[in-house]
Each structure stands twice: as structure tokens, then as C-alpha cells.
Amino acid sequence: LLLDEKGQLVSCEHGDRRLSLLTAGGGKRTLVDAYQGKRLNSPNDACFGADGKTIYFTDPPYGLPKRWDDPQRELDFCGVYRLAPDGTVTLLTKEMTRPNGLAFSPDFKTLYVAQSDPEAALWKAFPVKEDGTLAEGRVFYDATAAVEEGLPGLPDGLKVDEKGKLWATGPGGVYVITPDGKLLGRLSTGERTSNCAWGNDGTVLYLTADRYLCRIQTKTKGAGW
């Protein structure tokens, strides 16, 4: 979920396999549900680009009843896309097996994308070109070993603070990673932690951990606050 510049709710919908906009009158409008005539898998997470209007989103298969093996799947890859204000949909990369959460660095020059694949549980960093597309990505941080240790959860939602550190949900909780890929520590929840968001004055991190909604006061502030 995210709010546009008008305060309208934009949703990634697994069931309807689309991005939708909840209008002021309460009705929903489809923003995108297909790429080159084929239905999306099940959009999972989204964020706005530097202009506050362009939407970047991921499309893993988790909303399909049989996921990757579901007969209703029309695309043979899981993509990261860009939806321009004029409705144009651009495939940015299909190199990630299970793209999930995503967020920009404070200067919008890097897009971080989580990969919720238990065999390659990692985050990638993609340089953002001047036209808004992505250059070749690199592995930013790999948490596959934590999955193999039995810690619950996979790389999922993530946010960035004002100094560019990632606060990223993953195996065992929330990982705090510097812009150069160094792990500072982990908020251990003991649960499969799925998403996080800055709130209050921008210093409080809210997170969803299985059946729990939690919050923690930090000594930093979310980017853009």
C-alpha cells in the first residue's frame, strides 16, 4: 500500500492481479493489470520514483493459488516494472527469481529490491539511469545463510532512512544495512516479518511480524521526512 501525492490509496492486489487506485468517492480504478497483453502474476510491492508520480513495482507469483506452477500464470518470469503517469508500463528487469519489496535511496540514484527466494535470499541494488530505467544490478546483501540456519522469514518489505541505511525485513527480523552493504544489526522478532514503514514524526518504525503489528523508536528518521 502507498499514498499518492493527493493522499489516494494505491494498492498491490494479489487476487485481482493489478495495481489499483481507491478514488475519493470510494470506487477503485485499475492502474495496471497486464504487460504486453499478458496478465501480471500478482503485484506485491510498490514505491514512487523521484517525481512522486511514477510507480515502480514487483510482480512475484505469490497471489496465484499454485504460485509459479499455477495454470493461470501468463508471464514466464517475475518482473520489476515501472508505471509512468501516462500509463506506459516498462519492464525494468526479469533477472530476479522472486522480486518482493523495493525502495529508493534518498537521492533516487539506487533502487533496492528484495528477493524472497529461500535458495537465494538476498537484496539487489540497481543503479537508476537518467531515463528512469535500471542498469545492471548487483548483490547488495545475501541472507541465504540465515535461512539455512532456520531463521523464520525471507527478504520482503524494506524502507530507507535519511542517511541511506536499509531497514529491510528478512530471515529473523529487520536487517539494518549501511549504503555500502555492511550489516549493522538485526531487530530480532522471532516471527516471519513481512513489511515495515516509517510513522509518527518519521523516527518510529512500524512492522508486521506474522500476526503482530509492532513499532520501535529509532534514533534515525525515514528518508523524505
Image (cartoon, helix red, strand yellow):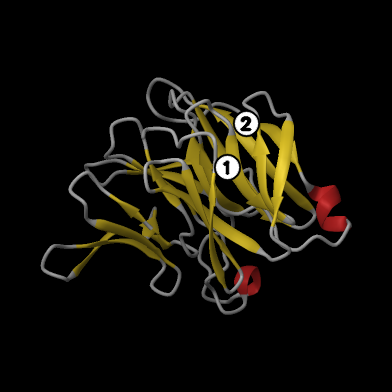
Q: Nearer the viewer, residue 214 or 60?
A: 214
* Residue drawn at 73 percent across, 29 percent down: 182
Residue type, label 1: Val
* Residue drawn at 81 percent across, 49 percent down: 144
The residue identified by callout 2 is 137
Q: Nearer the viewer, residue 192 or 141?
A: 192
Tell me the SS state at disc 1. Answer: strand
The residue identified by callout 1 is 113
Q: Are marks 2 and 1 in contact (CB under 8 Å)?
A: yes
- Rendering coords of residue 25 (x, y %): 10, 68
Q: Is residue 32 visible?
A: no
- Rendering coords of residue 26 (x, y %): 16, 71
Residue 74 located left or right of residue 118: left
Indicate the quadrant containing the N terminus: top left, top right, bottom left or bottom right: bottom left
Residue type, label 2: Gly
Tell me the SS state at disc 2. Answer: loop
